[in-house]
Structures are given as C-alpha cells and as structure tokens.
Image (cartoon, rainbow, N blue to C red):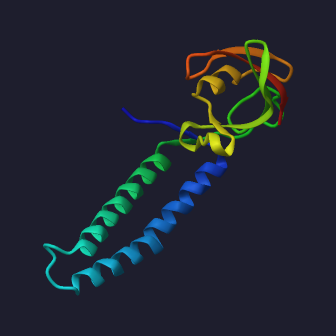
C-alpha cells in the first residue's frame, strides 16, 4: 500500500532542504567521526565508533524516510479564492468548553499530518480540531471531540 502524504509547499521545501543537508554536511561529518573512531584502534570496545555507527544508521534511515515522503507526497496548493478552511489556511478561533471561552483568538495553520506541530500553531488536517474545521467558513461554530475525549466548540473568527 502506497502512502500519500499531504504537504504544504513550505513543508515540501523544508523536507528537501533537510535531505540536502543530510546527504551533504551530515554524511561528511559522520564519515569523519567514523574515521576518527577507527584510528583509535580496537573497535570492539570503542564507544566513539559505536556512537558514530548509530548516527550513521539514523542519518541513512532519515534519508530513506524523506525520499519516500517526497516521492509519495501531494503538494496542497493554497486556494486563495476560497474562503473555506483547507490545508495551508491560517485560522483564528475561539475554543469553547462548557460555554466558556478557554482559548481566545488562537491562530492555527492547517497542515498535513507530517508538518503538524501544535507548539508552533500548526495543526493536522487529520486531528480532531482540524477535521472539524476543514470546509467550514468564517463565523461558523463547530462542535468536536478533543483527543482528551472532552466535547468542545470551535468558533471560527477569521480565515486567511
């Protein structure tokens, strides 16, 4: 089964940049660390060599992962004419629980699952809040169930 990853243009570019860095500078630094560790002699009890090998495995694994993502990704173009919420849109909301606003005028960017980072205000289109908002427009109130299981309401203040 092929995965199809949804990425914004910025997310796609960020992954390409990470891939270039991994294949270039990171690989070179790792090879130097391996050479240095090998020069220390006995490899059976060489912690530096073990660490460098582990780092090499991590780098190669990440390169394969990024190449797979880029190969099977769909770049979501922003539809600037549509006022409906979709991937790539920035949404300002109030989050309401039990009739009280618990988050006032919080701004989120709707992104694909791989780009999600709630601490940076990037929420996945597959998260409960993201799913609830996709396709909705400014001025709507939508009920959803948070991952904690609590019933919440999101009031959509603005869509950019």
**Of residues 46 and 62, which is closer to you in this image?**
46
Query: Would residue 88 be found to the left or right of residue 160 on screen?
Result: left
Numbered label tally = 0
Quarter of the image where the N terminus is located: top left
Quarter of the image where the C terminus is located: top right
Asked if one can make out residue 128 in the rendered structure from this viewpoint, the answer is yes
**Of residues 112 and 122, which is closer to you in this image?**
122
Q: Is residue 93 above or below residue 58?
A: above
Give residue 108's position: percent from left, percent from top: 73, 37
Q: Residue at x 52, y 61 (%)?
A: 18
Give residue 54's position: percent from left, percent from top: 29, 63
Give residue 121's position: percent from left, percent from top: 69, 41
Q: Is residue 55 above or below residue 69?
A: below
Query: Would residue 75 be found to the left or right of residue 66 on screen?
Result: right
Asked if one can make out residue 90 in the rendered structure from this viewpoint, the answer is no
User: Which quadrant of the figure has residue 78?
Assistant: top right
Q: Residue at x 66, y 51 (%)?
A: 10
Q: Residue at x 24, y 68 (%)?
A: 50
Give residue 154's position: percent from left, percent from top: 75, 20
Q: Residue at x 58, y 27 (%)?
A: 127
């Amino acid at each position: 089964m092929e995965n199809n990853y949804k990425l914004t243009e910025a997310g796609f570019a960020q992954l390409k940049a990470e891939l270039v860095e991994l294949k270039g500078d990171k690989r070179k630094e790792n090879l130097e660390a391996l050479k240095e560790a090998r020069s220390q002699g006995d490899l059976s009890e060489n912690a530096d060599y073990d660490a460098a090998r582990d780092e090499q495995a991590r780098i190669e694994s990440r390169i394969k992962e990024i190449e797979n993502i880029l190969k099977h990704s769909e770049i979501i173009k922003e539809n600037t004419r549509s006022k409906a919420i979709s991937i790539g849109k920035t949404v300002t909301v109030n989050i309401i629980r039990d009739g009280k606003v618990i988050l006032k005028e919080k701004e989120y960017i709707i992104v694909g699952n791989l780009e999600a980072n709630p601490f940076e205000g990037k929420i996945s289109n597959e998260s409960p809040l993201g799913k609830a908002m996709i396709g909705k427009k400014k001025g709507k109130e939508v009920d959803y169930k948070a991952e904690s299981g609590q019933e919440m309401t999101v009031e959509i203040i603005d869509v950019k």
